[in-house]
Image (spheres, helix red, strand yellow):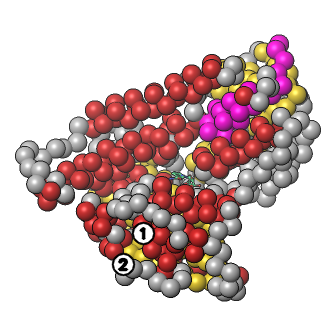
């Protein structure tokens, strides 16, 4: 038995950040992880591997569609799937080993295995029990299941299986037009598969800015992806390695079937808390099955905390990281807080989609008077030079005070551009503050500035 100030359960972005930060603040810290490698879903089977495949297939798209336009000619590259997977695995390895290095550097003990919490203040891994003043649950999330659709990770896949397919499919059905469905769907579409997305709602990416969602749908269709909207999947059958998905159109209840070589189920994720022993401990859950916490991440059990995907708030790696950072500060005796309204959301397709804060829809619902400043990337010289003139930046600001309320970007590097507005909103800036800040030319970020001008007297390039 060893004694620690803090034991963190789970070494994903929430857990590893919490462990490292707490160690940096002087606590004696251990982190329990049952996977062979650190980094959780994000580094092993989520954000990082999908970004490797998105990058590789974007390059392929550029070679096919744009090289010749730029005067680069010669034999056309084609995908070598095995090598592409090896590249992706190498990227995973570099990142997971990086966390192992950081654990050693910061003297965080990695306790290998799956943890249970037999009683407050104790963590059991296999036959060993350790004691800790504070225990943090950072066990993340797992794909939500869908009635009638049984995942085998060969023909019916979650994102995990979709990142390691043995061979490239000719036909793929994606259930769910959310983040995972659209990122992974565009990977396989760029690799030549016929991809059909079936989405329950009448539009993509629920909760997003309506204009962004419409533009996104149009651009993905242009790239060859197909969409069946307003359709509820009823079930999927696998016969001789091929799948048949049945769905009902919501407008008329008519039933349909679609065949595919594989099916990706991307209908959301749910907290992963299995085996921790939360029932026995009497840990309070929310109605949605998340661990209930107060404003300082404390659960209903003394000394037990929770962060990341197992608690409320957006299920995003960077939100979990912020939770972890803040909780480590709190445990070390400092004040800390994460504003979930200022957590950006990004979809790493081409074009990228990024959003922050209020949408026009939510502001209308609230009856809040606002102004919208919008500028197309067609007006941005840099975007046109790299064939990415489609899409726009939209900023929302309070009608009276000009204070920024939200930002919605679809276009090149949207996931990086959004952070200028994150900082601005963190400081309570107005659209004019952004407009009057010098932006280098020629950069994509000039579009953000022009959108800020569009909230006031108007932009130059429109
Ligand atoms: P999601 O919640 O983004 O989208 C799920 C979609 O499935 C929704 O549009 C929903 O209407 C639809 N759906 C549900 N049941 C259906 C049915 N029976 N038939 C047809 N459509 C149905 O969930 P997703 O894409 O699985 O992602 C899970 C989580 O992982 C999200 O919280 C997401 O934010 C996170 N994530 C974030 C990434 C990023 O930040 N780039 C990348 C990957 C995942």
Ligand 1 positioned in quadrant = bottom right
The reply, left or right, for residue 79 in relation to residue 182 is left
**Number of marks present in the image shown:** 2
Report x, y in % for residue 196.
36, 62
Visible residue check, residue 90: yes
- Out of 417 and 281, give the one closest to the viewer: 417
What residue is drawn where x is 47% and y is 70%?
449
Q: Quarter of the image holding residue 112?
A: top right
Is residue 356 depicted above or below 368 in this figure?
Answer: above
* Pointer 2 or 1: first along the chain: 1
Say the numbered circle drawn on residue 461: 2
Q: Position of residue 288 (x, y in %)?
A: 74, 57
**Position in image of residue 407 (x %, y %):** 55, 69
User: Residue 88, which numbered label?
Assistant: none
User: Answer yes or no: do the residues labelled 2 and 1 have beta carbons within 8 Å?
Assistant: no
Picture quarter with the C terminus? bottom left
Residue 22 within the magenta-colored segment of the rendering: yes
In the rendered structure, the answer to whether residue 117 lies left or right of residue 446 reads: right
Q: Is residue 251 above or below residue 290?
A: below
Q: Could you say whether the residue bearing mark 2 is in a helix, strand or loop?
A: loop
What is the quadrant of the N terminus in the image? top right
Q: Secondary structure at mark 1?
A: helix
Q: Is residue 10 magenta?
A: yes
Start-end of magenta stretch:
1-23
């Amino acid at each position: 038995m060893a004694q620690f100030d803090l034991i963190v359960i789970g070494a994903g972005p929430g857990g590893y950040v919490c462990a490292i930060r707490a160690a940096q603040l002087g606590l004696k810290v251990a982190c329990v992880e049952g996977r062979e490698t650190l980094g959780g879903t994000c580094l092993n089977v989520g954000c990082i591997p999908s970004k490797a495949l998105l990058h590789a297939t974007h390059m392929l798209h550029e070679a096919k569609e744009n090289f010749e336009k730029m005067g680069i000619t010669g034999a056309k590259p084609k995908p070598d799937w095995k090598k592409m997977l090896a590249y992706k695995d190498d990227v995973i390895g570099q990142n997971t080993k990086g966390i192992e290095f950081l654990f050693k550097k910061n003297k965080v003990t990695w306790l290998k295995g799956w943890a249970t919490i037999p009683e407050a203040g104790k963590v059991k891994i296999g036959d060993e029990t350790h004691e800790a003043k504070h225990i943090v649950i950072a066990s993340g999330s797992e794909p939500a299941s869908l009635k009638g659709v049984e995942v085998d990770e060969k023909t019916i896949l979650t994102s995990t299986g979709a990142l390691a397919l043995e061979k490239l499919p000719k036909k793929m059905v994606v259930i769910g037009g959310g983040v995972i469905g659209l990122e992974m769907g565009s990977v396989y579409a760029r690799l030549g598969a016929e991809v059909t997305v079936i989405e329950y709602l009448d539009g993509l990416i629920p909760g997003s800015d309506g204009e962004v969602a419409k533009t996104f749908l149009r651009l993905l269709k242009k790239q060859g992806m197909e969409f069946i909207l307003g359709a509820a999947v009823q079930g999927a059958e696998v016969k001789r390695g091929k799948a048949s998905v049945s769905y009902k159109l919501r407008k008329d209840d008519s039933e349909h079937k679609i065949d595919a070589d594989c099916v990706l189920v991307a209908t959301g994720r749910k907290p992963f808390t299995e085996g921790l022993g939360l029932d026995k401990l009497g840990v309070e859950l929310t109605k949605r099955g998340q661990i209930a916490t107060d404003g300082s991440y404390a659960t209903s059990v003394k000394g037990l905390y929770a962060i990341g995907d197992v608690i409320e708030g957006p299920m995003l790696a960077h939100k979990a990281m912020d939770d972890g950072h803040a909780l480590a500060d709190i445990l070390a005796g400092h004040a800390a807080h994460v504003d979930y309204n200022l957590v950006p959301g990004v979809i790493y397709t081409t074009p990228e989609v990024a959003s922050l804060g209020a949408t026009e829809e939510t502001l209308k619902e609230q009856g809040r008077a606002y102004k919208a400043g919008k500028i197309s990337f067609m007006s941005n010289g840099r975007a046109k030079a790299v064939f990415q003139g489609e899409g726009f930046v939209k900023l929302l600001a309070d009608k009276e005070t000009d204070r920024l309320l939200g930002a919605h970007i679809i276009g090149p590097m949207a996931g990086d551009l959004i952070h200028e507005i994150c900082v601005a909103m963190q400081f309570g800036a107005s659209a004019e503050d952004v407009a009057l800040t010098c932006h280098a030319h020629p950069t994509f970020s000039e579009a953000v500035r022009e959108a800020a001008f569009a909230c006031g007297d108007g932009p130059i390039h429109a």
